Image (cartoon, grey):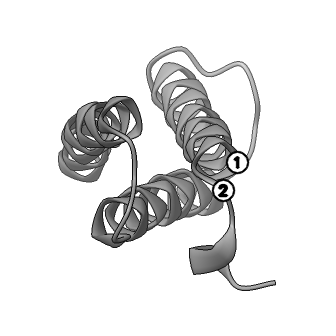
Amino acid sequence: MKWMELPEGTLLNRIFLFGITGIVLGVISLINQNYPFFEGPMGPLNGVSIGLQLVALSIAVLLLRKRKISDSAKNKAQKMTVVLGAAALFFIFSL
């Protein structure tokens, strides 16, 4: 099934899951850089974090581009776009 054919609720759930997972991984990486708990490279974790956030951001834009969506889904997608964009920029600049 194509992503454009999925219902709004499913897309909103996937946006949230990908976004929150990316943000949590980014926070874990930042904490480990300042207080080293694990001995290991944090570069791959940063890459996965930013990648997940960009995937969530792209799904949010895809949802906004759909033709017939409800106003509540549109508002949620717009809010998630702003939050994910700010979080992605924060984690990119914190490298």
Q: Which mark is residue 21?
A: none
Amino acid at circle 2: Pro
Compared to residue 47, the image places residue 21 above or below, namely: above
**Residue 81 at x, y = what percent?**
27, 45
Residue plotted at (42% across, 61% down): 63
Q: Which mark is residue 7?
A: 2
* Of residues 81 and 12, the one drawn nearer to the viewer in this rendering: 12
Query: Of circles 1 and 2, which is in front?
Result: 2
Q: Identify the element where label 1 is drawn.
A: helix
* Of residues 8 and 29, the one drawn nearer to the viewer in this rendering: 8
Residue position marked by numbered label 1 in the rendering: 10
Asked if disc 1 and disc 2 are in contact, CB closer than 8 Å, the reply is yes
Q: Is residue 30 left or right of residue 74?
A: right
Which residue occupies the extreme right position in the image? 1
* Of residues 55 and 51, the one drawn nearer to the viewer in this rendering: 55
Q: Quadrant of residue 21?
A: top right
Residue plotted at (57% across, 77% down): 4
Residue plotted at (66% across, 48% down): 14
Q: CA distance from mark 1 to mark 2?
A: 6 Å
Amino acid at circle 1: Thr
Q: Is residue 51 left or right of residue 62?
A: right
